[in-house]
Image: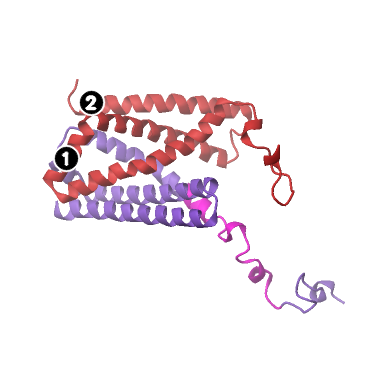
Chain colours: A red, B purple
Amino acid sequence: MAGNIDRAGRPLSPHLQVYKWQWTMALSILHRATGVALAVGTLLLVWWLAAAAYGEAAYAEVQAFLGSWLGRLLLFGWSLAFFYHLANGIRHMIWDTGRLLDLGGAYRSGMIVLAATLVLTLAAWLGAYWAMGAF
Amino acid sequence: MDEKLTAAKPGDGGRSDRRSDMARARGLGSAKEGVQHWWVQRLTALALVPLSLWFVASVICLAGGGRAELVAWLASPFSAGLLLLCLLATFWHAILGLQVVIEDYVHGEGRKMALLLLTKGLGWFLAAVSLFSVAKLSFAG
């Protein structure tokens, strides 16, 4: 356990790997991962807005990319990350008030976050295809 | 004799310190910035709940439309104003979040500082470009 003593010889708190893995830990790191992904995704947002400001030709280019299979895949990933980070962010804000901090509360709210992510992502894409006149 | 007035402060060699308690405490908090980072992260998160949902709903309504529809949407001061706020909160929130991730995982003061400067500089640059784009679309079409 060499990693558990710092250079000055003082003990450190145990590292992550000594804990039994739980699915709520995956939700926790997923909040960070989706946050970083959304930050990278702002590049797409800036490209879209700047292209629109440049004019018709540049906007047609970005729309063509977003409409391609790669563009749609990126947008789908972005929407999944967005709704997860939003739902879990609200969970974090509830925790900040001191509520739902017990094990049962963490499990139940975690399940709600996962369900909300799937439902909202599905609803957003159905809405988008409906707006485009797909059905 | 009042103990409190004559007691020597630690490290002052027995001389009395005429600074107030507040002046001595200032600047010594965690990371020398207190709760400002934590608080702005939460404020922008709270603002982004309605703003980002409104943005996603608006983009869904714009799906399938062309540039003319986007320009018409941003011609409204209501939409343009909300979008400016949404972008400002988004970039501020993202920059604060990335800062925490970098501080947690990047070790070595030089590399950490370089990456923080790069992230913050790029983040605010992208924020400026997107805010200006919205303003141009709104004013000039």
User: Does B63 sit left or right of A107 as displayed?
Assistant: left
Please provide the residue range marked out in magenta.
B18-42
Quadrant location of the N terminus of chain A? top right
Task: Residue B141 in the image: state x and y as whole percent.
Answer: 14, 51
Question: Of circles 2 and 1, which is in front?
Answer: 1
Name the quarter where the C terminus of chain A is drawn.
top left
Query: Is B61 rendered above or below residue A114?
Result: below
* Residue A129 marker: 2
Direction from residue B39 to residue A6 in the image, left or right: right
Query: Which residue is painted at 56% across and 31% down in the image?
Result: A25
Contact (Cβ within 8 Å) of mark 2 with mark 1: no
Q: Position of residue B58 (x, y in %)?
A: 26, 38
Horizontal and vertical percent position of residue A89: 47, 38
Q: On what subunit does the disc labeled 2 rest? A: A
Q: Residue at x 34, y 24 (%)?
A: A122
Task: Report whether residue A89 is seen.
Answer: no
Q: Which residue is mark 1?
A: A61
Tell me the SS state at disc 2: helix
Marks 2 and 1, the one that precedes in the sequence: 1
| Farthest-out residue, front | A2
- Please state which amino acid type lies under the numbered disc 2: Tyr
- In this orientation, which residue lies closer to the viewer: B57 or A25? A25
What distance separates the C-alpha of mark 2 from that of mark 1?
Answer: 20 Å
As for residue B23 lying within the magenta part, the answer is yes
